[in-house]
Structure formats: C-alpha cells, structure tokens
Amino acid sequence: MLRKLNLVFEELFIFIALLLLVMFFGVMAENFFTAGTLTAILTQLPALTVVTIGMTLVLISGGIDLSVGSVVALSAGVIGIAFTVFELPLIIAAALGIVAGGCAGLVNGVLGSYFRLPVFIVTLGMLEAGRGLAYMVTDSQTVYIGASIQSLSLPISGIGLSPSFLVSLGLVVLAQYALTRTVFGRYLIAIGTNEQAAKISGIRTEPYLTWVLVISGLLAGLGGLMNAAYLGASDPNAALGLELSAIAAAVIGGTSLMGGRGSIVGAFIGVLIISVLQNGLAQLGVSEPVKRVITGLVIILAVLLDRWRSR
Amino acid sequence: MTARIATEGLDKSFATPVLKQVALQISPGSIHGLVGENGAGKSTLVNIISGLLPPDSGSIALDGRSYSPASRKAALVAGIALASQELSLIDTLSVAENILLASFPQKALGINRHAVRQRARALMDLVGLEHLSPQTPLAQLSLAEKQLVELAKALSMPEETTRLLILDEPTSALTSPQANLLHQIIKQRSAAGLSVIYVSHRLDDVLSVCDTVSVLRDGVIQLTAACTSLTSNDLIRAMSREELLRHSDDKPRAFGEVRLTVEQLSSTDFPEPISLHCHRGEILGIAGLSGAGRSELLHAIYGLSAERQGRVVLHAAGPDTVIDSASTAANNGIALIAEDRKSQGIFSGKSVSLNTTIAGLGKLGGALSTILPKREQRVSEELIAQLRVKCEGPLQTIDELSGGNQQKLLVARWLQAKSDVWLLDEPTRGVDVGSKLAIHNQLRQLRDQGATILIASSELEELTALCDRILVLSNKKAVATYDRGQWSKEMLLEAAFSNYQGPRAAAG
C-alpha cells in the first residue's frame, strides 16, 4: 500500500510544486488570474508539450535527442512551402511536415542503433543539419501562411481550448499509457536501465532504440505544425534551443538523464511549470536575463529535490 | 636467516572463510610458487601481502619487522612490487606513462619527460618490447604485450629497494620465448637477492622456475616443498580432495532426446571450435580454471559473441531452430543467467515484478500488447511463492533483496518465459548457503521435468554434485568430457590444467 502511494507520490510532488507556483504568481502579480494569461500559456504550450513527450521517451530509453528544435523549424518550413509555393491542401502539407520530422528521427535512430554511433553526437549533427535544411527549404525567409493554419491554435468556441492543445493533451495520455501499460514502454524502460540485461532477456534493442527516435522526430514534426499554427507562418528561426526546454521539462518532471526512469505526465507538469514561470515572471516585470537565471535555478533545484526524494 | 616475508596465522573471510591460519615463509632470493584450484585463496593471499586487502587476523613480517600495509601505496613504499593478473594499466596513456605511473621522474616543474622515455625504454628492452616505441598508446597493444608492460611496471621500482616481487599469472597470454625471457629475468633478479612469489596455473612453469612451491586448498596450505622433489601430478593431488566426490546417485540416469546441439562453435574469445550436445533431462557441467573460457562459451551459445562461427541448433518436435542471436535464443526457450548479476542480470532500481516478467513479455505478441498491472503482479506473486523468494512483494525494488534472492528472481524470470534450456554461469557465486541449496534443488527439479541445463562453475564440488556429464575447458579449448561416476576430482583438475602445460604457440 505504501509503495502504491509512493508511485502516485512521484507525480503528486511536482503537481504540488506547480500549484504553489501558480498561487505565488496569483498573489504577487495582479493580473495573473486572467483569461489573457491562460490564453498566452495555452497557445505556447502545445508545441513544447509534444516535443517534450518525445524527448522524455528518448531519455527513458537511455538516449537523448538534441535535434528536436531544428526539426520543428524544418517541419514548419516544409509545411509553409508545400502550402504556399506548391499550393497543396493544408492537410497534405501538414502531413509532409510531420513525415519530414519522422525522416530526421529515422536517420538519428538508424545511425544511433544500427551504426552504434553515440546518439548525443548524431542528434547534435542533426541539430545543425536540420536547421540548415530549414533555411534551405524556406530560402531563409519567414513564409506567411495565414488564417487557415492559425485556426489550429485558436480556441474552439464552446470548449475554450485550441485543437493543438487538445491534441497535445491527448498525446500525453496516450504516451503515458504506452509507457506504463505496453510492452513497448516496458522495453524502453528496461533498455534504459540496463541495455546488456535487456539484450540477454531477449529484447532486440536496435529496433526499439530506432523507433523511439523516429517517434521523437514525428512529434517534433507535429511540433512544427503547432508552431506554424501559433505564428501563422513558418519561421526558419523558430524553436531555437527548444531541445533544452524539453530536456528541462522532462527533468523537472522526474525523468532521469541516465535513462530507465521517467514519466510523461510528470514531464507535462514540467512543461506547465516552465510556462507558468515564464509568463508569471514576465507579468512581474522581471527582465529577460533575470528570467533565464531564475529558470536555470529552478531546473537545478528540481534535480536536487529529485535526488533527495529518491533517497 | 630471517625470512624475507613470513606470514603467521593469516585469516580472511568474506561470506565464508577464504584463508585459514596461513603461515608462509619465503627466504631472500627465493622464487616461491603458489598453486591451487579456483577459489583456493591464492589471489586473496597475494592481495593481503601487496596491501590491497587487510587480513582479519594474523601477522606478517618483512625482513623480521612487523609489516601491515594500510594500502597498496604503503606496500610499494615497503618494497613490494606486484604484476597483477587483472592488469593495472590505463588504456589511454602511453606505454612509458603506464610503466612509470607510480614513480614518475620529477624535475623542478612537473614530469621529466626525457627521463620517463629513457627509463621506460630500458625496461621495455629488458622485458622484450624492443619493437615498440615508449610513446605508443597502450590501447594499441596486444594482450601479451600488455602483460609485458605490466611486468615492466612491476620491475620499474629501483632494484635496491624492491624486496619482494609478486607475479600473479604472469604468463597467461605469453608465447614460449616471451615466457622464457620472463623466467630468465626473475632468475637473475632473485640471484641478486630479490624474493619472488609466482602464482600460476602452468604447473610445469612453476616447477621449472621456482625453487619452492606451496599448494593452497580451501584457504589452507596443504604442502610446501622444494620443487626438485615434486612432479605436476603431486601438485594436482595436493590440490584435489578426493573424499567429497562420491555421491549416492552416481549411476548414470536416463535422458530424453537431444535438445541442444553445438557444432564447431568458435568466437574471438575461443578460436578453437567446440562441439557439444545436451539432452532433455540432463545437466551438463562446464569446468575449467578461471579464464579457461567457460563464460565465453555460454555467451557464444546464446548468440552474444563477436565473430561467432559455427552452429547452435535447438531440436524440438517441430522444425529445428538455429540460434543466431540472443533474442532468437530467449524467444525459443533458452535462458541465460550470466555471472555478473548486477551488470548483466537485474534491472537495478526497478520492481521485483518488472524484473520477473521482462523476458516473458515477448510472448504477449508484439510491442503494442498491453501489460495488465494486476495480472503482472499476480504472476510474480506466484513465482515469489514458488521459489520462496524473501521479499515484501512484487512492488519492492530488487536492489533491496539479498544476492541469493535476486538470483532466485532471475530463475523466476526465465521460468515465467517458459524456458527449458538453461545456460547458467556461476549460478551460486556470492549467494548464501541456504539459497545455494534452494537453487540446486530447483535445478534438479527442472532437470526431472525435462529441462536441458548447462552449468559453468569454478566450483568442482558444485558440478560433481549436480551434473550428469562434465565438459572440461582448459586454456580456451575443450579437452575432455566425463560421465557421471567416471570422474574423480583429480581427473577433472588434471584435464583443467592440461592445456596450460605442453608446448605453447610459437612466438607471434
């Protein structure tokens, strides 16, 4: 019974941290509890959420995906060009963008697991190459797409939540289910905990380590769509450094950089903490440099707390 | 004459006593051989003298003065040089840096590089590494060359302050001319007054190079005598303990059909092909000294080795299955319980339940199959009860369990995966006596239910108690197979030592 509580406790812990943060800003900033803040948070959130889902899965498998920010920009670029220059229907353009992300993930995965190159290096290369491709696709220009794509990030009347947000929320639930209740998720945890023992247990590690990077690529592709929807345009400079925010959110949510341990729900709360922090600090009139210092401290604090908690 | 080194009543226990009242005396200028089978206590004794382990009780005197080194460093200062079997070298440093790591020539600011090269050069020429540059990175060297570097490192201490040189299996990777050179060097040094402890499986070497030899068995010195009066058979007899070998069930039992065939299997770890087969309801033991290739053989059968050649075939009622990878092995009923439980067995930090069910998940049918937590817990609760694992329940973290109970869970893991061919590497190493008996009984029960079992063990008593046949490996080669009732410990040991004697490979 105690142990069961402990499992719930893992996510409960950071959820309480999130609530405290919200209460803090509620008291300190006069306008925090307004529709404006909520909209700001909800529109920025989906892209980071889906990218963080992929990142968390990769981290749990013992790897890392540094390329996600660039892949978001690449996917957004592909969507913008397919829609405006080639005049393809938006749905086809969106699919192409997501597939482009999947392809980047496939390259990462194959090089990482079948060619046994360190994933850190491979995805670092993809971070550079993906950004370059995004510039090439868009000719280094921001491509305006317009209102048709923006509807994805606008609230649906009656619900008050955007399609992007609903999709990202659905993916959180799906990924948490896949992680905790399917053989796929179990194998990722096993491989991330002890790859050699996983092999001896009969798990073919290569396909799983490839798939997890493909999934991360596909989700980054989807993140590109959400980013383009939020901006109404494809910006080749979009999502610079997003990989670091995603890693930070995952770590705040209790994911271990050593592999084998993590939670999607936790990572989602991590995303919320980062968003609330950024918006709350902005409302308090904190300058950008100070905001970054505080965010950095929060990440370190989260890891310290996690260390203390797991003792 | 005062002994160079004299131990008195040395005791050391880990889980069980390893050394019992060891009294050893070595004269100045003597080359003293130390032999015994696996686990006899040789390494422990050597580690105590070289300052790596403290004894539980007893005393050591060095040239008549009390000597109790607090660390390896203290032993070095006292003049005890060691060339270890587990080479103490660093791959990323150069040969010269490795040789002089403990005693870098200093100058006013930092290391005197010129002196390093010069002194390393002299030592390398001495041990037969003339062909290498001192700046060569160690990683580029062959195992034999590394062994010579380890030796040069041990010889790097100034001759006048070195009082005892300990060589632990110094020739295991060397060719004949290299070993001869080594023997020449230590004979010269001993003539100049250096004492040497020479630990080796190669009994012929020991008899030819040493003047005195001691035989350890179960942590007790059985025999200390001048080498001139002994043959290698005398040594083997002193190492073995005949009386424990007879068992009530020494009659050969009936087996089922052949379940596993290994044809001409070889890998980088054992280049000479090995063939074997094992029936349903049979336990085949794999014996051999440490480093003989026992684990490597099991890993190759399971499909894990690099550059694996030959065929491993599983026979069943249906078509045969060729085992070409660990996943084919695991998913067709083969279980491997590796020697190193921590790095190759358990999933550390995870629950008992995850650790129990992981190998059986492949049978659920695909990566997207659902795991039902309630059912998973019920399955592992049943196995916990069946194997009498002492734990709080399926959700306890496996690290909190004792070694014996972790080992039982690994057995449970493969029971759950419905394995019927078991490859077990040192299945009872480091577990308590109670768990050991429980594991033995479990294996007998599996055997009676028709399982095919291969056990590699360094404990001959374990193999003779459990096995129907024993295959003996010696120096990476299969040398003999004995049926139950036809073996004696002496025969098994003789076979285990056999391929270390005879002529070695030519220089290469």
Image (spheres, coloured by chain):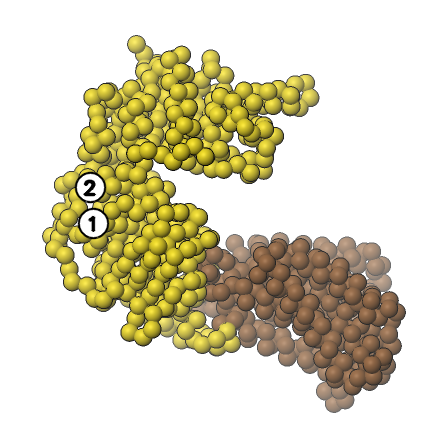
- Give the residue number, with chain letter if any, for mark 2: B491
| x and y, in percent, of residue B362 in the image | 43, 71
Q: Amino acid at mark 1?
A: Tyr
Q: Residue furthest front?
A: B506
Q: Residue at x 33, y 17 (%)?
A: B30
- Rendered yellow, the chain in question is B
Chain bearing tag 2 is B
Q: Amino acid at mark 2?
A: Met
Residue B147 in view in this figure: yes
Viewer-side residue, A94 vs A265: A94
| x and y, in percent, of residue B357 in the image | 41, 68
Q: Quadrant of the N terminus of chain A?
A: bottom left
The tint of chain A in the picture is brown
Q: Which mark is residue A66?
A: none
What is the distance, in whole Å, between disc 1 and disc 2 at their CAs? 9 Å
Horizontal placement of A150 versus B359: left or right? right
Total labels drawn: 2
Q: Quadrant of residue B494?
A: top left
